[in-house]
Amino acid sequence: MSRLACLSLLLLLGWAAGQRLRNDLDGDCVPAVPQDAKDLSFFPDGFKLEGEDGKPAVDVEIAEDFKVEYGPNFKVVTNLRADETYVLYQCGTNPPEKSLFPGKAKMFEIPLTSVSVADTTFIGFMELLEVEDRTSFASSFASSPCFQKLASDECGKVAGDPGSQFANQEAVNAQDGKVDAIISTSASSSPNTIAFTATADPSVLKRAEWIKFVSLFFNKEVKANQVYDGAKQIWNRLKSSDNGGGPVIAWIGFQDFNGPEIFLHFADYKVEYVQAAGGRTLDRGALKKDGAWKEVKNGFTSTSLGAGRKSLAKLFKDVDVVIDETFTPNNAKYTLDTFKSNFAIEDDVSHPFLENKKVFRVDGRVSPGAFGDGLEWFELPVARPDQVLKDFLQAAGSDKAKDHTRVWLRNIALEESVTVVTSQACGGRVKNCAFEPKVICPSVVATCDDSLEFRSPTDTGCPAPRCSKN
């Protein structure tokens, strides 16, 4: 069926959105479907996501916050936290009947060709799947060099997030009608937004598994399975089996909006990194009973304890390693002296983490921005916890990472400097302020007798037709 015929059917069915905007990527699409192949499944085993047992299934629930069900030429993806459903149909085939799905379901023709990435955590997943070249607008807080390039003054392609209460309306309007989809931080009534909530999943591996969610919109499930399985294997091989004899590692932060306040962070994924590195966290229950520390809720999963500076002296005597998450617009100027000033530590006072020279920040790699540094910590590390674990193992003094060079954890007690990543590192990948996307092969290839055959999931490129006519 022609693209025009598909569009006519789409409008008759009353869908609000769905058509791919670029017409130069027809190689993404299924060749003309013969009448006798109309019931063919275009997502066979080998091209699907894998479940916990490593086997493909028709209905797969991944991580804790999303699930997918495969149809013959479509996928139904549900973000459980955002309560949004996306119907993704293979380009070159007819869209499914609207009556099959919830009334608020959003439809997209896939693979997506042009996206606006307003959520920076989405970037690392796109790069691992090798689909970043389908980005047309990028967050102004991006650290990835080519995304910086798009959002630069030179290109001006800044992503706007209709789902954010702080949305840049000028950016939202500029991308209108120029993208297939907008990657948003939350649910939105806009028909072409996709809510990406990976960081709401509690565990580091569950967050990493959201690469499978991203892959569904680009027919990259095979790659997603490979990347996630590799990361999981490395994580399981490296994680410590120590049962409590390691260093005490504390995630802390400081702010001074209404007087100085100190925070201890106990988000599930932060505790998981500490334990996987063989470390121990402070006893949150005991601190709460002490009376000085009060529980503070931040975001979806992060639970913190807050107190004044007077509670620190007693606390710090038991801490061997500190991870300081204090916000600053200029991380290069955040030194050990800054740390001591924020946390009221006198020069003649010593604590285990100072004696050990173990004061870390998560600003090892930053990007310059109009409103302060962007932290790469909120991009690739979400998708590659196995690589982050190496940083933590090294910080904790584990022999498993003694030769590892840390990437994201910067030790200010050793006067380590930040690595500034700029758009210059993009090279020539973005030409005339646009990527040149590569074709994403469909699961089938045409034959000389106008029938279809499945290609191998392991093909590295799009195979040529099985035979050619004379």
Image (cartoon, grey):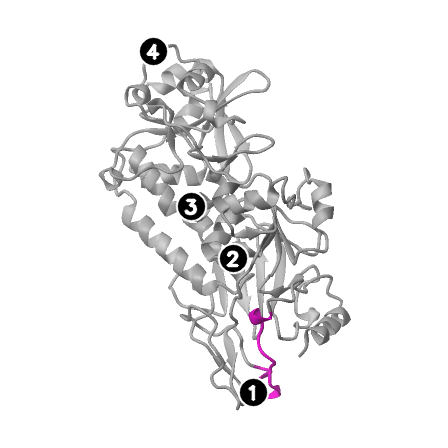
Which residue lies at the image location 48% right of the left edge and 35% below the top edge? 366
Which residue lies at the image location 69% right of the left edge and 40% below the top edge? 168
Residue 206 image point, x, y percent: 44, 50
Q: Residues within 10 Å of mark 2 (few under 14, many from 20)?
A: many
Q: Which residue is mark 3?
A: 204
- The mark that comes first in sequence, 4 or 1, is 4
Q: Is residue 31 magenta?
A: yes
Labels 2 and 3 touching (C-beta < 8 A): no
Tell me how far mark 4 sits from mark 1, CA to CA.
Answer: 80 Å
Q: Which residue is mark 2?
A: 131
Q: Residues within 10 Å of mark 1 (few under 14, many from 20)?
A: few
- The mark that comes first in sequence, 1 or 2, is 2
Residue 392 image point, x, y percent: 34, 37
Q: Is residue 119 visible from the viewing direction of this image? A: no
Tell me how far mark 1 sits from mark 2, CA to CA.
Answer: 30 Å
Q: Residues within 10 Å of mark 4 (few under 14, many from 20)?
A: few
Q: Which mark is residue 186?
A: none
Looking at the rendering, in which quadrant would you find the N terminus?
A: bottom right
Q: Which residues are magenta?
A: 26-39
Q: Which residue is mark 1?
A: 450
Q: Amino acid at mark 4?
A: Val
Which residue lies at the image location 47% right of the left edge and 22% below the top edge? 333
Q: Nearer the viewer, mark 2 or mark 4?
A: 2
- The mark that comes first in sequence, 2 or 4, is 2
